[in-house]
């Protein structure tokens, strides 16, 4: 990539300084293990974005405009999500050793993030990226509804808004590659399916496991990970915006309005089963 691509300052929609951590209602949130785990595991994944950016930049080498957006907009925004969530964790739970926990997480996560994990063509990889952004959009929207603490509500909504914009950008790029690669619905569907199945395990699981391990590191009788995961998941399930998820999942299929209306209900049921069970 040319130096000019990275030299200009990113145009972020908000800044870390916009967060008023002093206004956090610690009473409301410090005892909530579910919120700790959800915010902390998200901070790990967001903070590991630079690893993924390198993979994506290699994969999209030569597509200058897109490379530039990845490096100057997408990556700085994702890393800012990580920094802001980390700042929140460290403010509310000052005894938690975020750096050490992240180092453990990153050692495992970096071995999962390789070029082999990418889809076999750029168009299909962009479908996968749309699904990742669908996953983050709905995650932060559910967390926003669940958390109840005003500063975290503000933060999760800011992040959610960025994730929607990421989805839109990946989607627009996908439309161009769909044409040039002549991608059919079956191929798009296969990429969708692979990535959604992937969303359920891997990254989020690894992050949650390390957040929990460090949270209860000195506890003589830590709760079973399976129980913790189950409890956190149950709470998120109650707030999960399933209709939004379905709209974001089926958009790349380019169905006509009539087919889309017809497909929405069965797809909602399917999405509920796949994403929430
Ligand atoms: Fe993000
Ligand atoms: Fe994103």
Image (cartoon, grey):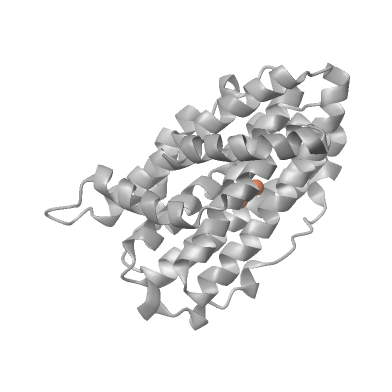
* 209, above or below 55, in the image: below
* 87, above or below 207, in the image: below
Who's the residue at 72% across and 44% down the image? 167
Q: Position of residue 226 (x, y in %)?
A: 26, 42
* Residue 54 visible in the shown view: yes
Extreme residue in the bottom direction = 23
Left or right of 93? Residue 238 is right
How many marks the image carries: the answer is 0
* Quarter of the figure with residue 204: top left
Q: Position of residue 143 (x, y in %)?
A: 50, 60
Q: Position of residue 149 (x, y in %)?
A: 47, 74
Q: Position of residue 63 (x, y in %)?
A: 84, 30
Who's the residue at 22% across and 53% down the image? 217
**What quarter of the picture does the N terminus occupy?**
top right
**What quarter of the picture does the C terminus occupy?**
top left
Who's the residue at 59% across and 71% down the image? 154
Left or right of 151? Residue 157 is right
* Quarter of the figure with residue 176: top right
* Residue 71 visible in the shown view: no
Who's the residue at 64% across and 49% down the image? 244
Left or right of 14? Residue 79 is left
* 37, above or below 153, in the image: above
Please state which of residues 28 and 267 is positioned toward the viewer in this rendering.
Answer: 267
Please state which of residues 276 and 212 is positioned toward the viewer in this rendering.
Answer: 276
């Amino acid at each position: 990539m040319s130096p000019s691509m990275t030299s200009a300052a990113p145009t972020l929609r908000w800044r870390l300084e916009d967060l008023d951590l002093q206004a956090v209602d610690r009473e409301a949130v410090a005892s909530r293990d579910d919120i700790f785990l959800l915010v902390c595991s998200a901070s790990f994944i967001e903070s590991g974005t630079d690893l993924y950016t390198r993979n994506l930049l290699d994969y999209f080498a030569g597509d200058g405009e897109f490379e530039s957006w990845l490096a100057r907009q997408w990556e700085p925004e994702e890393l800012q999500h990580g920094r802001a969530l980390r700042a929140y964790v460290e403010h509310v739970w000052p005894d938690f050793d975020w750096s050490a926990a992240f180092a453990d997480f990153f050692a495992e996560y970096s071995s999962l993030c390789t070029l082999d994990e990418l889809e076999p063509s750029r168009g299909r990889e962009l479908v996968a990226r749309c699904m990742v952004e669908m996953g983050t959009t709905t995650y932060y929207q559910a967390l926003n509804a669940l958390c109840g603490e005003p500063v975290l509500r503000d933060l999760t909504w800011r992040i959610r808004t960025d994730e929607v914009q990421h989805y839109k950008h990946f989607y627009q790029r996908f439309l161009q590659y769909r044409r040039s690669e002549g991608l059919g619905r079956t191929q798009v569907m296969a990429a969708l399916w692979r990535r959604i199945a992937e969303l359920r395990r891997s990254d989020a699981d690894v992050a949650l496991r390390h957040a929990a391990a460090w949270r209860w590191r000195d506890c003589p009788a830590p709760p079973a990970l399976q129980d913790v995961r189950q409890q956190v998941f149950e709470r998120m399930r109650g707030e999960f915006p399933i209709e939004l998820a379905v709209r974001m999942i089926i958009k790349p299929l380019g169905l006509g309005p009539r087919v889309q209306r017809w497909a929405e209900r069965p797809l909602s049921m399917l999405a509920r089963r796949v994403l929430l069970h």
